[in-house]
């Protein structure tokens, strides 16, 4: 697995994941053990938990000194939480991962490696889960939804909602913000004229807690969002680099 010394900010949005925090923070600390602590930070954004997740994260700063904890006073959703973390990030490359333990922190090196080269137009590196550990119903829902999404958005991905994303911070902040935008980061980045690189990553079983999403819930927000996103893709004339003379 390639390792990189590229400075970065790890961004993790969580809600009611208290039991998953100690194992996850321990894995991040082990993955970062050989890095210079001044070259990374881990920003966890608690999005309105009611199970003591913020207090558990505060306790775990002793395990991971690079840990920063931001707390929303109420639940605003994953996209809002990620935006809060990325706006607070101190490094030019941001990497997002899920906080439920299904993403392996060791894969962060895979996400960062493409940015080591001279690729100024690389806008996003997106994880693509292999051997997904979701329930059968979620896998079938994805098989139905993904072809429709690819047809409408032409984003070329088989797994647009994988938690692993790596982006220049300024690229993320230049994208139009809306609720649930995290599901469309690949399409939004393509819309701006940037390159996309897709990376296979591992998927693991959730060991504690339950998913915050259901197929019905995804459907209710996903359909209008998808058609809205298709409209947004059409209503754009492309990125322009202006020159001052």
Image: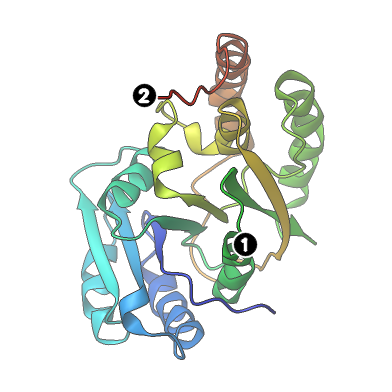
Q: Residue 234, which numbered label?
A: none
Could you tell whether 124 is left or right of 172 in the image? right
- Foreground: 60 or 141? 60
Where residue 150 sits, quadrant-wise, is: top right
Q: Residue at x 54, y 43 (%)?
A: 213
- Residue in view at x 54 percent, y 73 percent: 105
| Disc 2 packing (10 Å; few <14; some 14–19; many ≥20) | few
Depth-wise, is mark 1 or mark 2 nearer the camera? 2
Foreground residue among 173 and 77:
173
In the rendered structure, the answer to whether residue 170 lies left or right of residue 131 reads: left
| Frontmost residue, 53 versus 38 | 38
- Location of residue 158 with respect to 130 vertically, above or below: above
The Cα–Cα distance between marks 1 and 2, rounded to whole angstroms, is: 28 Å
Rendering quarter of residue 151: top right
Is the residue under label 2 in contact with that under label 1 (CB below 8 Å)?
no
Q: Secondary structure at mark 1?
A: loop
What is the quadrant of the C terminus in the image?
A: top left
Q: Earlier in the sequence, mark 1 or mark 2?
A: 1
- Give the image location of residue 127, x and y in percent: 66, 55
Q: Residue furthest left?
A: 73
Mark 1 is surrounded, within 10 Å at the Cα level, by few (under 14), some (14 to 19) or many (20 or more) other residues, namely: few
Q: Which residue is mark 1?
A: 117
Q: Where is residue 63 shown, x and y percent of the image?
A: 31, 86
The quarter in which the N terminus is drawn is bottom right
- Residue linked to disc 2: 244
Q: Secondary structure at mark 2?
A: loop
Residue under the image location 75 percent in, 39 percent down:
142
Q: Is residue 111 above or below residue 49?
A: below
């Amino acid at each position: 697995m390639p390792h990189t010394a590229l400075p970065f900010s790890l961004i993790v949005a969580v809600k009611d994941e208290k039991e998953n925090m100690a194992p996850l923070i321990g894995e991040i600390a082990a993955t970062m053990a050989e890095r210079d602590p001044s070259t990374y930070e881990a920003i966890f954004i608690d999005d309105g938990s009611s199970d003591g997740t913020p207090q558990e994260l505060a306790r775990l700063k002793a395990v991971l000194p690079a840990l920063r904890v931001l707390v929303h006073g109420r639940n605003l959703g994953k996209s809002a939480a990620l935006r809060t973390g990325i706006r607070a990030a101190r490094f030019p490359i941001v990497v997002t991962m899920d906080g439920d333990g299904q993403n392996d922190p060791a894969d962060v090196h895979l996400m960062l490696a493409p940015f080591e080269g001279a690729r100024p137009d690389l806008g996003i590196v997106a994880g693509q889960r292999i051997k997904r550990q979701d329930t059968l119903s979620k896998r079938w829902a994805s098989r139905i939804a993904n072809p429709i999404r690819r047809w409408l958005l032409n984003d070329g991905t088989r797994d647009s909602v994988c938690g692993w994303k790596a982006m220049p911070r300024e690229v993320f902040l230049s994208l139009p913000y809306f609720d649930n935008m995290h599901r469309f980061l690949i399409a939004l980045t393509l819309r701006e004229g940037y390159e996309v690189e897709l990376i296979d990553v591992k998927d693991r079983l959730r060991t504690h807690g339950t998913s915050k999403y259901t197929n019905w819930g995804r459907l209710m927000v996903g359909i209008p969002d998808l058609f809205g996103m298709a409209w947004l893709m059409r209503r754009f004339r492309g990125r322009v680099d202006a020159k001052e003379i």
